Image (tube, grey):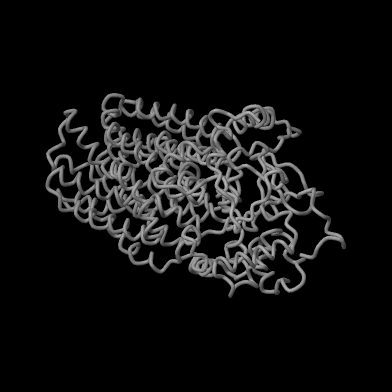
């Protein structure tokens, strides 16, 4: 097959590593082979399907011997059989037959998927605190902007002072984009996820306290640059830590806690701004310094959390990985299943993506086809967060409302309302991100953000009558709040959740660093330029420009961002194995016409041919189509999707389940 010069399978052989005994690689001519650099057929493959029971159990025995897991051999044999057919665990016979407790635990993954261990809850709480630190750090400068420029003698109307104010506001994002994000890979390599979060939390603690004691803009700039190192390292690690510890059915909900509690941190920051504003001329010091508060429990709690089992696997510490999974799952059968399934999927991945040096892995982001597609998708969702205009509100809403005629107190109150709306409307995404999906949420919310920003700009264009300034500001605030209500369940939680899951394990840290650096670099650009933009274009021109950016971002998401919901992290190799040209052609020639017929012409008979096809072992008669994201077999996806995200479409070349089939 001819290769695509930009998105095909060119050079895939260059990245193909030699097979090993423990990889268990099948011949390339077999039906089980799927090239994750050029998955043109869009198959999502369970590499265990098609293996005879005897072969599978022999492979498990070899795995236990090689990885020092002989003491857990029996439970791992059971786990491998469950991983091979995740819906047929009650039919397993012989020595590997599951106990009643094990069957009940697997059933509860569907019926009570939020019944998870306390240590997993602790992990998510700790990650949530890390997100709250990020949000509070962002909004401390929002309130301080009303006072610190005058206090540090950069409050004039000159271009120089406006740039310096923007530079001080942008400093954490400059530190993040230039240093913090890129340090996360080597720090993760040596200290693990927990150690990296501990180091980052200290950078979010001491420089923040130092901000309260600065007497020149240079000192404040330096402290906020150091804060950026911690913010970047933390933002690149915390979502990965949450994603790698979470089961697939609720991974989106657990990882999106980053945005939910980031929004809560923003809200707490606006509360602190209001509380501190009446202290006097030094209130800006308290507004900036108060962000140290959530960093304290983060430093303490992180070492009570289990380390990421996937980080242990990356270090070939399988015994530690299994111990970690035992703490993160309700029953050992779940831990055994997940450990072996992760292992075999990573063996497939290793055939196409080799582990190189840090610099080599960075260049792999743009050269290995499977990784390049993840890089493009994460770039789109991250830069879209800046294109949507949320940070012109998060950073400068007090200034925008003040320009609109509000007093300092009214401006801070309006900003407090924005923070509250941003938090409350992020809560529904806990459920919708794993049901509607990441892509669907983005495609729905971006058009809404465009018109609400445009409406806010039109309202701000009205010349405020001094006697009616409160009414004028109320209309501006109304549309800003509507904008936040649409942002919070969509572009709010999706970017960090999405970027933390799309990269293969070998490139996850550097990939997430790239994604976060993209997001926060453009946040820095926005922080520096927005004071000038507001001065030149006024609120109407600024809001109108970002309304246009929302439409551009919508088109980019439609063409380049695949859905990832309900798939394990390793199964996403097959999603991003589909060439971009194939994905784009499907969206333009099939999905878009279907959407027009279904939702514009209201034709109920409109059908959508699926893009992805999922392999499973049984229930061929249940196959039917899904018309939301292009997955085949909607019945299985809805009813069986919660079983750790395993594939749910029958392989037609397998033996029947009758008497002649081998026992399970």
In the foreground, 627 or 420: 627
Quarter that holds the N terminus: top right
Of the pair 405 and 533, the residue shown nearer to us: 533
Residue 503: where, in percent of width, then height?
Answer: 50, 46
Residue 537, located in which quarter of the rendered image?
top left
Q: What residue appears at the point 74 percent right and 64 percent down from the top-left corner?
A: 54
Q: How many numbered marks are there?
A: 0
Q: Position of residue 116 (x, y in %)?
A: 55, 66
Q: Residue 561, how many percent across, how many down?
A: 54, 37
Q: Where residue 273 sits in the image (x, y, percent)? A: 27, 50
Q: Is residue 87 above or below residue 173?
A: below
Quarter in which the C terminus is drawn = bottom right
Q: Quadrant of residue 126?
A: bottom left
Question: What is the quadrant of residue 198 in the picture?
Answer: bottom left
Q: Is residue 365 left or right of residue 393?
A: right
In screen coordinates, is 384 left or right of 326? left
């Amino acid at each position: 097959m001819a290769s695509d010069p930009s998105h095909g399978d060119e050079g895939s052989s260059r990245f193909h590593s030699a097979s090993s005994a423990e990889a268990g690689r099948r011949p390339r001519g077999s039906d089980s082979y799927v090239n994750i650099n050029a998955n043109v057929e869009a198959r999502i493959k369970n590499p265990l399907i098609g293996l005879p029971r005897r072969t599978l159990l022999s492979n498990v025995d070899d795995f236990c011997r090689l990885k020092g897991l002989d003491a857990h051999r029996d439970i791992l044999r059971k786990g491998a059989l469950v991983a091979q057919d995740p819906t047929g665990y009650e039919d397993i016979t012989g020595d590997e037959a599951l106990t009643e407790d094990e069957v009940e635990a697997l059933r509860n993954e569907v019926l009570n998927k939020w019944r998870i261990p306390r240590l997993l809850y602790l992990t998510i709480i700790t990650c949530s605190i890390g997100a709250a630190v990020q949000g509070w750090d962002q909004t401390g400068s929002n309130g301080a902007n009303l006072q610190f420029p005058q206090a540090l003698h950069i409050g004039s109307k000159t271009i120089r002072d406006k740039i310096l104010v923007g530079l001080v506001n942008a400093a954490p994002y400059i530190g993040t984009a230039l240093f913090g994000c890129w340090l996360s890979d080597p720090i993760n390599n040596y200290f693990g996820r927990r150690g990296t979060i501990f180091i980052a939390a200290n950078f979010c603690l001491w420089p923040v306290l130092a901000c309260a004691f600065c007497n020149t803009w240079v000192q404040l700039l330096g402290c906020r640059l150091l804060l950026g190192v911690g913010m970047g390292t933390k933002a690149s690690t915390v979502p990965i830590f949450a994603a790698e510890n979470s089961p697939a059915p609720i991974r989106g909900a657990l990882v999106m806690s980053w945005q939910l509690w980031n929004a809560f941190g923003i809200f707490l920051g606006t509360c602190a701004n209001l509380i501190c504003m009446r202290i006097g001329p030094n209130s800006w010091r308290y507004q900036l310094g108060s962000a140290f508060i959530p960093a304290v429990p983060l430093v303490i709690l992180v070492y009570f959390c289990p380390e990421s089992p996937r980080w242990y696997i990356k270090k070939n510490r399988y015994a530690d990985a299994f111990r970690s999974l035992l703490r993160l799952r309700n029953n050992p059968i779940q831990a055994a299943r997940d450990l072996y399934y992760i292992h075999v999927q990573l063996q497939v991945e290793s055939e196409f993506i080799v582990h190189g040096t840090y610099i080599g892995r960075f260049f792999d982001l743009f050269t290995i086809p499977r990784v390049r597609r993840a890089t493009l998708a994460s770039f789109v969702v991250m830069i879209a967060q800046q294109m949507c205009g949320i940070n012109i509100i998060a950073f400068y809403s007090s200034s925008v409302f003040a320009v609109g005629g509000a007093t300092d107190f009214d401006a801070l109150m309006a900003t407090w309302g924005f923070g509250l709306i941003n938090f409350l409307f992020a809560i529904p995404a806990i459920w919708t991100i794993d049901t509607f999906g990441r892509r669907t949420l983005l495609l729905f919310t971006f058009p809404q953000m465009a018109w609400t920003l445009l409406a806010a700009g039109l309202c701000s264009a009205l010349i405020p009558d001094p006697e009616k300034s409160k009414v004028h500001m109320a209309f501006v605030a109304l549309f800003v709040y509507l904008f936040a209500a649409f942002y919070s369940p969509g572009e709010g939680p999706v970017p960090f959740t999405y970027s933390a899951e799309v990269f293969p394990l070998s490139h996850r840290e550097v990939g997430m660093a790239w994604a976060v650096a993209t997001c926060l670099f453009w946040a820095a650009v926005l922080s520096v330029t927005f004071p000038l933009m507001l001065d030149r274009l006024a609120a109407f021109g600024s809001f109108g420009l970002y309304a246009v950016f929302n439409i551009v971002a919508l088109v980019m998401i439609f063409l380049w961002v695949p859905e990832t919901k309900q798939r394990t992290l390793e199964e996403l190799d097959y999603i991003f194995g589909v060439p971009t040209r194939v994905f784009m052609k499907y969206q333009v020639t099939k999905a878009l016409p279907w959407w027009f017929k279904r939702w514009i012409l209201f034709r109920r008979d409109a059908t959508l041919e699926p893009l992805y096809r999922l392999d499973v072992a049984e229930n061929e008669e249940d196959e039917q189509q899904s018309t939301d994201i292009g997955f085949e077999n909607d019945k299985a996806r809805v009813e069986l999707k919660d079983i750790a995200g395993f594939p749910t479409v029958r392989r037609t070349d397998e033996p029947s389940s009758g008497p002649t089939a081998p026992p399970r």
